[in-house]
Image (cartoon, rainbow, N blue to C red):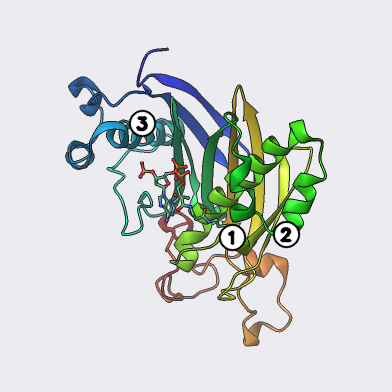
Amino acid sequence: MIPYSAAFSKAVHFGHLAAIHIPDSKEPVPEDVLNRLDESERQHARSLNGYRQVDWVGGRLAMRGALDDMDRRTPPILVDDWGAPVLPRGLSGSLSHKRTLAVALVARSRHGRLGLDLEDLAPARMGIAERVLLPEELDAVMALPEHRRWTALVLRFSMKEAVYKALHPYVHRYVGFDEALVRPDVDCTAAVELRLREDEGSFRVEARYAWLPGRIITMVRIRPPRRPRHPNHGEGSEGEQKRTPAEQGRPVLDQAPGREVDLDEALG
Ligand SMILES: CC(C)(COP(=O)(O)OP(=O)(O)OC[C@H]1O[C@@H](n2cnc3c(N)ncnc32)[C@H](O)[C@@H]1OP(=O)(O)O)[C@@H](O)C(=O)NCCC(=O)NCCS
């Protein structure tokens, strides 16, 4: 395995997923690798040390890989006040790194916001169960044979971290592990029920997971609650809900504060 080389890149249900091998080491990232980043990313990377620098650079390279798959010119992907990656308008993306792998998932944001998480399957850390699971989830995990409990737990834990990353752009606050109930299915999907403390709305959550050798990847896509129908449009219809603001004759910028304008969508 060559450090900072591509591990894999593929189209998945929610977008483009790309992964980069990273070294499990505190050694500074070599200059030739830093040179693969944009200048402002490079400056940020130089402000970091040890594992943090390795992880951060790995995540940016993975995200660049995913954006390349979409044939997107890759601008610098910096950091917002909460630590989330900032993608160009019209795109959503998420990344995760764990020991020797960094992964990133990117798609157009009009399909929803993405969250991605990567976890190692070993060592088992059953001690986190009560901190990260709701009582119903704990019952489901503890009802399993002992040898299956950790994978059932880490799947739920990882899914919640992915939920957090996808939800954060909408709610802009810390979301606790008790605010989502995860019910994994054997078909690599999961039902996620949000129980938001601040009742920000009924978001639509889709969740999937994939097993890699020794790891799990969880992916979440969250769409905002459906907007109330316009009073002048009678009962409305599914087709109408899908029309863009431009198609509905509304100025594209006349939208609720905080809703990102997707220029590609707006321009048709
Ligand atoms: C933020 C958090 C989810 C990151 O997960 P992690 O396992 O520690 O680390 P990962 O490698 O998987 O992910 C780190 C990446 O997440 C991204 N990230 C950090 N904060 C984020 C946020 N608020 N929103 C979206 N993405 C964020 C960053 O890209 C970061 O990598 P980078 O700093 O190199 O760019 C985790 O530290 C945390 O705070 N969890 C508690 C909240 C939670 O999960 N609640 C469950 C709600 S149901």
Query: CA separation, marks 3 and 2?
Result: 36 Å
Q: Is residue 193 above or below residue 139?
A: below
| Residue denoted by label 1 | 223
Residue 75 at x, y percent in the picture:
29, 42
Q: Which mark is residue 135?
A: 2
Q: Is mark 3 within 8 Å of ligand 1?
A: yes
Q: Could you tell me which secondary element the residue under label 2 belongs to?
A: helix
Residue 8 at x, y percent in the picture:
50, 22
Residue at 57%, 53% in the rendered image: 163
Q: Is residue 145 above or below residue 191?
A: above
Residue 60 at x, y percent in the picture:
34, 36
Q: Looking at this view, is 123 or 48 the one in front?
A: 123
| Residue denoted by label 3 | 58
Amino acid at dot 3: Gly
Q: Which mark is residue 197?
A: none
Give the number of the mark in front: 2 or 1.
2
